[in-house]
């Protein structure tokens, strides 16, 4: 094993050796017997950095189990080139401040639990109260995940930097109740379109091909808090493209993070409920934020990545009470996307066939079962709407669409500021706010939509909006507000500041209860109601 020791390490080592004894790591003085140190002498004694750290973690976890006190394992600063990783155990805080681990082969740099635990009887949220403070984890562009965690309750990462993978995630976590990540940086990850290692931090499921060394089990992610982190030059920042049917990931909070130059999207979640995505800054990505129900797009029969609970029970031998039959979606999923600043690039997504846009909330209608090579997708026919979504107070500069809602119900789109990326090119119709197939009761109010969109606010393909009120729409190439085989309540109090065709238009059998009190300026034609469409019109300027 190669090892480079910096001057800072040598200085720290001199202090640490004062309280070290052998054969077992000693307890540090003045810490109420709560800290165990790993020094050069400890490393040499155990013949290698990972072995020394793991031996000390085992000792610390055993002591914690006896008296119920959390133990800290503190590693002296230095740079280490390693051939195997660290295995974390319950009730241990690993202090890696000033430490750099550089991977020399494809093992995980950090792994919760034993790497051979599939047959060890570990189930549920087994490991508990684990924390990693600091450290730089350089994956050296190897094709394996840098940090892997599962079967754990209360897992925290604070101030860690994880970087440099190829065709692999920087971090994967599954089967965790209480994942807290603050002030961490994830950077420099590449993947081929065929590899599907999209997310820098993937919130995953315990399926065989995803977590090979862990027992397969139908236990979802719960209580996730990701705050103050940076995701730079990665395919996607945070998210999931897998899910457990009828067992959504719950209490997902992604707040006040920075996403920069993500090749695909900043945040993309599948089958999430009780969601708060707020205060994030997203720049240089084709897409901003996407929330999916069962990973089906545009109403197509595509549920890749959504696994039946019975799959996990059969493969892992752990019974589950989660039903595998169709169950109607929750009436209020409490999905909130608020106060984010999103400035997108003009590039297309190279990893998936999504159009460029700021925010997408996308339920699905599955009309036939499909099975994929990973055994996902074999879910019952049914409509999987996203119910209870609020999209408010976001500032969006998009190379494509602003906001789109598909197969959603009881949704509010309010107080957003949406504009086009300068000189953005787009082959098809581009929308500011688009409510389309399968959408019901979507209220659109108090949004400001800049110039350059083909259609400012559109309700199409039997989508149904609620009231469309008090919006300001800049100069559009075609129509300011349009219903095309769509429905709405009142269209009232809006300002249309220019349109190449119509200020307000209802076509193809569309319906609105009332078109009243709108102000239309510099529109080629003001109001068009045609093609068997119906609306009461009065008092517009």
Image (cartoon, helix red, strand yellow):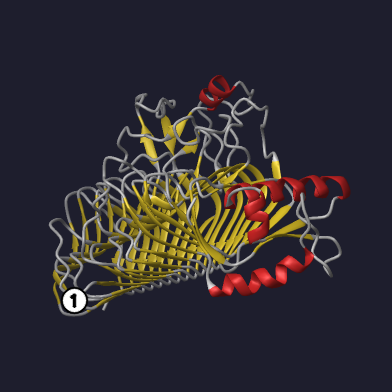
Q: Nearer the viewer, residue 21 or 29?
A: 21
Q: Nearer the viewer, residue 486 or 140?
A: 140
Q: Quadrant of the C terminus?
A: bottom left
Along the horizontal axis of the image, is 233 left or right of 214?
left
Q: Residue at x 50, y 36 (%)?
A: 211
Eyeballing the image, is 196 above or below 288? Answer: above
**Residue 344's quadrant in the figure?**
bottom left
Disc 1, SS: loop
| Residue 539 x/y as whole percent | 31, 74
Q: How would you rate the neighbour count of disc 1 (Cα within 10 Å): few for under 14, some for 14-19, many for 20 or more?
A: many
Looking at the image, can residue 160 be seen?
A: no
Q: Nearer the viewer, residue 204 or 158?
A: 158
| Residue 413 x/y as whole percent | 42, 63
| Residue 236 x/y as whole percent | 37, 55
Along the horizontal axis of the image, is 335 left or right of 435?
right
Looking at the image, can residue 23 be seen?
A: yes
Eyeballing the image, is 215 above or below 352? Answer: above
Residue that carries the numbered disc 1 in the rendered image: 498
Along the horizontal axis of the image, is 298 left or right of 75?
left
**Residue 528's quadrant in the figure?**
bottom left
| Residue 150 x/y as whole percent | 59, 41
Eyeballing the image, is 498 above or below 364? Answer: below
């Amino acid at each position: 094993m190669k090892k480079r020791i910096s001057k800072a390490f040598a200085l720290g080592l001199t202090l640490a050796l004062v309280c070290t004894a052998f054969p077992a790591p000693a307890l540090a003085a003045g810490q109420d017997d709560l800290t165990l140190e790993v020094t050069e002498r400890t490393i040499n004694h155990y013949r290698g950095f990972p072995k020394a750290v793991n031996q000390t973690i085992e000792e610390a976890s055993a002591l914690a189990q006896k008296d119920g006190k959390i133990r800290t394992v503190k590693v002296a600063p230095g740079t280490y080139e390693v051939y195997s990783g660290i295995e974390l155990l319950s009730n241990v805080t690993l202090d890696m401040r000033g430490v750099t681990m550089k991977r020399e082969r494809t093992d995980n740099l950090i792994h919760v639990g034993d790497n051979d635990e599939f047959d060890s009887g570990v189930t549920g949220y087994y490991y508990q109260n684990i924390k990693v403070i600091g450290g730089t984890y350089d994956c050296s562009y190897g094709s394996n995940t840098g940090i892997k965690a599962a079967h754990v309750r209360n897992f925290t990462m604070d101030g860690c930097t994880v970087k440099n993978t190829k065709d692999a995630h920087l971090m994967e976590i599954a089967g965790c109740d209480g994942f807290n990540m603050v002030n961490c940086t994830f950077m420099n990850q590449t993947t081929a379109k065929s590899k599907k290692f999209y997310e820098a931090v993937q919130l995953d499921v315990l399926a065989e091909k995803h977590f090979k060394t862990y027992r397969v089990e139908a236990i979802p992610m719960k209580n996730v808090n990701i705050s103050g982190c940076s995701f730079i030059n990665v395919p996607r920042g945070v998210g999931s493209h897998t899910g457990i049917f009828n067992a959504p990931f719950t209490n997902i909070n992604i707040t006040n993070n920075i996403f920069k130059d993500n090749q695909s999207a900043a945040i993309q979640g599948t089958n999430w409920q009780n969601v708060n995505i707020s205060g994030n800054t997203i720049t240089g990505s084709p897409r901003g934020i996407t929330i999916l129900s069962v990973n089906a797009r545009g109403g197509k029969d595509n549920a890749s990545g959504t696994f039946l609970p019975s799959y996990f029970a059969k493969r892992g031998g752990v019974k589950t009470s989660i039903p595998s039959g169709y169950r109607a979606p929750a009436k209020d999923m409490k999905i909130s996307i608020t106060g984010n600043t999103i400035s997108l690039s003009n590039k297309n997504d190279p990893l998936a066939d999504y159009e460029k846009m700021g925010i997408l909330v996308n339920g699905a209608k599955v009309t036939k079962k499909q099975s994929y090579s990973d055994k996902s997708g074999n879910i019952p026919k049914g409509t999987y709407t996203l119910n209870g979504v609020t999209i408010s107070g976001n500032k969006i500069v998009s190379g494509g669409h602003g906001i789109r809602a598909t197969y959603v119900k009881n949704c509010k789109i309010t107080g957003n500021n949406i504009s086009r990326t300068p000189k953005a090119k787009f082959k098809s119709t581009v929308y500011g706010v688009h409510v389309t197939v399968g959408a019901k009761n979507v209220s659109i109010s108090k949004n400001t939509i800049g110039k350059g969109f083909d259609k400012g606010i559109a309700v199409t393909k039997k989508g149904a909006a609620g009231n469309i009120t008090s919006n300001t729409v800049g100069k559009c190439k075609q129509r300011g507000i349009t219903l095309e085989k769509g429905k709405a309540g009142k269209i009232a109090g809006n300002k249309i500041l220019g349109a190449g065709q119509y200020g307000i238009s209802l076509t193809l059998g569309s319906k609105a209860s009332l078109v009243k009190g709108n102000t239309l300026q510099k529109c080629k034609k003001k109001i068009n109601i045609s093609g068997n469409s119906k609306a009461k019109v009065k008092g517009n300027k």
